[in-house]
Image (cartoon, coloured by chain):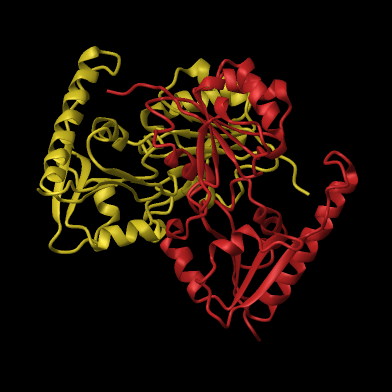
Chain colours: A red, B yellow
Amino acid sequence: MTSLGTLYGLGLGPGDPDLMSVRADRLLRSATHVAFFRKAGRPGQARRIVEGLLPASAVEHAMEYPVTTEIAVDDPAYNETLSAFYAECAAHLRALSNDGHDVVVLCEGDPFFYGSFMHLYTRLVATHPVQVVPAITGMSGAWTVTGQPITWGDDVLTVLMGTLPEARLARHMADSDALVVMKIGRHLDKVRRALATAGRLDEAWLIEFATMPGQTVVKLAQHEGRVTPYFSIVVVHGQGRRP
Amino acid sequence: MTSLGTLYGLGLGPGDPDLMSVRADRLLRSATHVAFFRKAGRPGQARRIVEGLLPASAVEHAMEYPVTTEIAVDDPAYNETLSAFYAECAAHLRALSNDGHDVVVLCEGDPFFYGSFMHLYTRLVATHPVQVVPAITGMSGAWTVTGQPITWGDDVLTVLMGTLPEARLARHMADSDALVVMKIGRHLDKVRRALATAGRLDEAWLIEFATMPGQTVVKLAQHEGRVTPYFSIVVVHGQGRRP
């Protein structure tokens, strides 16, 4: 009887391949099956990070998101479409594991921190061997490239998604010392208004493509307001005790 | 004229050497000067993580914290003692850099995230070449070993220090989806009371020595209340949208 293969949720970190973990690097260089999410017709950000690292013999499994832009996020059909997609991906990985194959699933950032892999993890972990390899988060990459520490002493850090309602964003922004806002994309104007309401706009930085080619770091108040990538990150540094 | 050596704030991650970055591993294996903080008479946690990785020829510089347990944190003498210590360490690193030596400064976790290295960074960055290598945070290590994702969808994550006043802890605990509490140590009872006040105690996990020998993961409500290490971490997982 073939023993089950291990499914790895492999965190790749913020984008620079040099910042992935020694364990992730080793697993990639000996990988036989590699799976990754991507938008239809796009190379996929996670796949791009490992370019040149995979053995030529590795079998690649692209998991292409169903097009959901025509369905509103709060429409039940949105969740149903995504749920069916994740179920199908999980079934594919399960079949590979049943055949004894180890599979490395590429994850941007840290898999358990707002990652897509979690939707596979919950569908697989009860029946198949799954190992999660943590990684440097995108936000660590972002605050590092600002050249300023994010938190000092007993600063409170709050991590917010740009998808939240403006009033909730503003409330948390006013009540925290340091801030990280992720999933910005088309929510940039709302995030900017919430920061202004909370009196924090002048302290905010916008980081695009942290640690990657095309990286930009600007004060948010000076940003032109053009569309920013979904993976942009806003950072407000804490100002806590510093002997 | 000798050119200045580079001072690296080298993040080592949560503790397992296999989880440090490829860049950190490479810098360590070619290091000529290595500096690290430790308590007097102790090996030092950061130094322990790199055991076996440094070249035998590397010169080691232990930076020993002054004993401050007899001074209250809110006594101005506490800050003055620490400030003098950091100034002295920075002067030592500056002298090495002036002589053309690169120095790797070992940092547990991520250097810009509640790290001690920041106190050297601010004293050095204006005049000397300093590079910060981000790393997997201790909290990523902690939530990974719980085997459950920390945040989903648009969950709010708040990071709190156990050193904060109980009322402020409870307020943030009630107003956030996911929680991380660091710097627990002798503040464990206060943290537990604040979680109970916020109605979150039953969801809380206590992680000791995440990713290291001696690792423990327990529900906080079932913890015996014995003293826990300063670097213990409490985690409450978010329960956001999951298709």
- Give left or right: position of A144 versus A121: left
| Residue A18, quarter of picture | bottom left
Could you tell me if residue B239 is visible in this image?
no
Residue located 44% across and 56% down the image: A19
Observer-nearest of A189 and B109:
A189
Residue located 16% across and 44% down the image: B97
Observer-nearest of B181 and B3:
B3
Observer-nearest of B110 and A90:
B110
Q: Is residue A3 above or below residue B120?
A: below
Could you tell me if residue B158 is visible in this image?
yes
Q: Residue furthest bottom?
A: A1
Q: Position of residue B178 (x, y in %)?
A: 61, 35
| Residue B125, quarter of picture | top left
Observer-nearest of B199 and B211:
B211
Residue located 61% across and 40% down the image: B237
- Give left or right: position of A151 versus A47: left
The tally of labels here is: 0
Q: Is residue A62 above or below residue B180?
A: below
Q: Position of residue B189 (x, y in %)?
A: 45, 26
- Give left or right: position of A71 versus A161: right
Q: Position of residue A78 (x, y in %)?
A: 85, 47
Q: Position of residue A176 (x, y in %)?
A: 53, 22
- Give left or right: position of B19 versus A188: left
